[in-house]
Amino acid sequence: MKNSQTFSIRNSKKKAILAGLLFLLLVLIVCSLCSGAVRLSPADILHVLINPQDHSLQGSIFLLSRVPRTCGSVLAGMAFAASGAVIQTVLNNPLAAPNIIGVNSGAGLAVALVSLAGTAYLRILPAAAMAGALCGAAVVLVIAGKTGASRMTTILAGIAVSSIFSACIDAIITLAPDTLVSYSWFRIGSLAGLTMSRIRPAFFMILPAFLLLLSLAKQMDVLMLGESTAHSLGMNVKRIRTILLVLAAFLTGAAVSFAGMIGFVGLIVPHIIRRAGDEDSLYVLLSSALGGAVLLTLCDIAARILFRPYEMPVGILLSLLGGPFFIGLLIKQRGGRIHD
């Protein structure tokens, strides 16, 4: 009787958290559509929605700037956080993040190479970032597979590959300083100047990858029980781990392709979700996706309005606010002790 009551309470709590995150996200979406150098009222937005052919200043700002930027913050936040949740589960490390499997460094190297090729190729930067992210993850997974694909070898392979790619990026910037101009926006991470044409390809990669992850939630639950237990239950651990990491790379790579290397979201959001609620993978994936969208949209709004008439790239603001918060969270949860 007590077990059924506990299960019911947990279910109610999870539904309440998901509903709260969804409501908060909807509120922030409206705020994002209204906020910026030119303020739009809800009445202005409603007018443009009713009259989509409106060519007024408010209509142009709403359709060409606010809508793509808001869609981008929601999509990228969902992708980064869901990817982080998967990687933390697969590697059994609550402090793991998407950059640990070579996604960020691979995308960065691709962008640096395209920038080196000249301004004529800058239009393919998003596609290059996506391809580089997937190639970086592929190199890490191949190396990890050759050595057994254990959690530790995957982490070590990711660190080694990221170091090599980062050194290549530094070499390109040192030998050809002009590439830094094109590479800087990507390295910092920004949602300014987004267009729907840049977001659309990523959307058609993120959505199916996320839905596929949801269908693999039960396998993630089994994986969390440990490798020996998963093997005893008939799971092909190496295969499932590889599939999950590939999907995580797809999510991060697609988001990086239009948002740049925005950090912190894939690390802190799933970490907080696990601390605050249940370890059920389906719940963690859904709540992490909503929480990531909430966090990135909130920070993007703040980046637009806190420094008017200037604007700070959301990647900088997210790191400035998120880093100290995460350190404080770690110290608090460890009872004020950093080391065991």
Image (cartoon, rainbow, N blue to C red):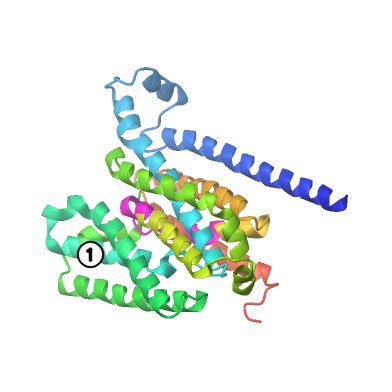
Tell me if 28 is positioned left or right of 8 in this view: left
The residue at 48%/50% (across/down) is: 212
User: Is residue 299 found inside the magenta-colored segment of the image?
Assistant: no
Rendered image quadrant of residue 43: top left
Where on the picture, by quarter, is residue 195? top left
Residue 340 appears left or right of 324:
right
Q: Is residue 320 visible?
A: no
Look at the image and tell me in which quarter the C terminus lies.
bottom right
**Disc 1 element:** helix
Residue 291 in view in this figure: yes
Side of 193 relative to 288 (left or right): left
Q: Name the residue under label 1.
A: 112
Q: Is residue 304 left or right of residue 336?
A: left
* Magenta segment: 254-269
Residue placed most toward the observer, 80 or 50: 80
Q: Residues within 10 Å of mark 1 (few under 14, many from 20)?
A: many
In percent of width and height, residue 106 lies at: 31, 66
Residue sitting at x 66%, y 77%:
337
What secondary structure prevails in the magenta region? helix
Q: Residue 93, position in %: x, y?
A: 56, 70
Amino acid type indicated by mark 1? Ala
